[in-house]
Amino acid sequence: MNTPAGLMSGDELEQTLRAVGDARYHIHHPFHKMMNAGELTKAQMQAWALNRYCYQAVIPKKDAIILSRSEDPEFRREWRKRIVDHDGEDGSGGGIERWLHLADGLGLDRDMVISRKKALPATRFAVGAYVDLVSSSSLLVAVASSLTEMFSGAAISERVPAMLQRYDYITEDILAYFTPRLHQAPRDAEFALAMVKQWADTPEKQQAAIDALVTKCDILWAQLDALYSAYVVPGHIPPGAFVPPDAFVQKGT
Amino acid sequence: MNTPAGLMSGDELEQTLRAVGDARYHIHHPFHKMMNAGELTKAQMQAWALNRYCYQAVIPKKDAIILSRSEDPEFRREWRKRIVDHDGEDGSGGGIERWLHLADGLGLDRDMVISRKKALPATRFAVGAYVDLVSSSSLLVAVASSLTEMFSGAAISERVPAMLQRYDYITEDILAYFTPRLHQAPRDAEFALAMVKQWADTPEKQQAAIDALVTKCDILWAQLDALYSAYVVPGHIPPGAFVPPDAFVQKGT
């Protein structure tokens, strides 16, 4: 039953989605706060870059799944930009290449990063849950799960200057990944939000969109939980996962 | 190339699989050791029961997927026992019902447990990875991923007396789940191991079976990592997850 009381206006839906981000976006996670406060060791920074690569690497694949599920060429043309952004074009690398450049800059072995074999299992499981979500849910839910990008601009604007200021070994060149994201993410989020507002025309669909954003926030949060558990709590690196070089385990190195 | 040097004998393969368990089975996880040592608060015990329900609840579903992928009625007859064990028969509950009885005994609300809404996202992601593994891999890999049961008998034999001795509120009745597992798990593991030995007739297949067991160990380990991160490290419960009653947060209560 689509009662008028149950159906939010587009603006109300947007406010509700923004409230989800205020409460659950991973910028509020202790690991993220440590990063911005300059409190991570280089070992922890390496673990972050290595694990987040798993997430970065799957983004164009999940966007291709979304592309494959749409009947609308106009939607597909717009969504396709995301794949171009991450995979790059002939002669110029995209977001994945820039993430590898970040990992290089932190002293990680590129082949090890790409193999993902040393990533935390919990990272791989969370990333797998993201692929599963966009594969098995409605297109509305798949698109709504991308709406964490509504909050990433603010996160990047805070993170990049904080990292440059507080870690000697971090340079603008190493953080080149984030520069194009400052205009790509808002552009992508604006389009996705417009689609979600348009498609979520019943209270049930609106709730499904909100739930999708909650689940996506959980997916990002769980990745930082795994990093905290393995690399901040002493002695808790799971069997087989990346063990940072001793020299990088001291704070400030 | 199936070189004689690369292909292990059945006994060698079994020894290699057992070595995986020795190194990676979750009985070696700090949370598990705390449980057996009597160091968990009732709050932590509740969180364990609540989250592990997610795993228990999916077992017959993953076994049904395995059933659906076999061409062999004899294999399916044998594997079907697992579903009967977990789902029960008319008039008698199975493993899932006994797990809910354990959760009841710890004072958890049954509807909340069944809904899984308060479980840790990382638990759900790990369980989802298990379903994905048995769905998308070879039948050999799906069956090999069950081989953690080779190690569960020893774990239960250690856990049950330790829990009865060290926690006042734990009774034999509450732990009734574990009693039938003491004969079911070895029976199931013996059959699965025989199948894996028979089917893994190339070095590549043997390695795939070993890798499957490693991944399954990772799936179990990640669930205890998530519990440790959320309920042992202070102040780290993820947004939306189960918050234990204050009265149960003190050790020994």
Image (spheres, coloured by chain):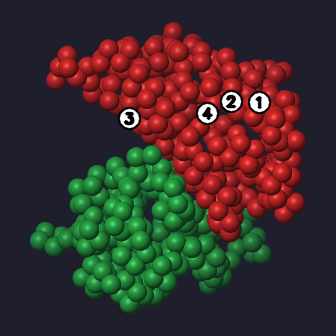
Chain colours: A red, B green
Question: Which of the two discs, 4 and 3, labels the residue nearer the N terminus?
Answer: 4
Q: A73 above or below A182?
A: above
- The residue indicated by pointer 4 is A59
How far across and how far down the image is residue A73, in percent? Answer: 51, 11
- Mark 3 and mark 1: span between their CA atoms? 32 Å
Depth-wise, is mark 1 or mark 4 nearer the camera? 1
Residue B53 in view (yes/no): no
Depth-wise, is mark 2 or mark 4 nearer the camera? 2
- The residue indicated by pointer 1 is A161
Question: Mark 1 near mark 2, Cβ–Cβ under 8 Å?
Answer: yes
- Mark 3 and mark 2: span between their CA atoms? 27 Å
Q: Which mark is residue A158?
A: 2
Question: Which of the two discs, 1 and 4, labels the residue nearer the N terminus?
Answer: 4
Chain letter of the residue carrying label 1? A
- Mark 2 and mark 4: span between their CA atoms? 23 Å
Question: Mark 4 near mark 3, Cβ–Cβ under 8 Å?
Answer: no
Residue nearer the viewer, A144 or A73: A144
Residue nearer the viewer, B26 or A37: A37
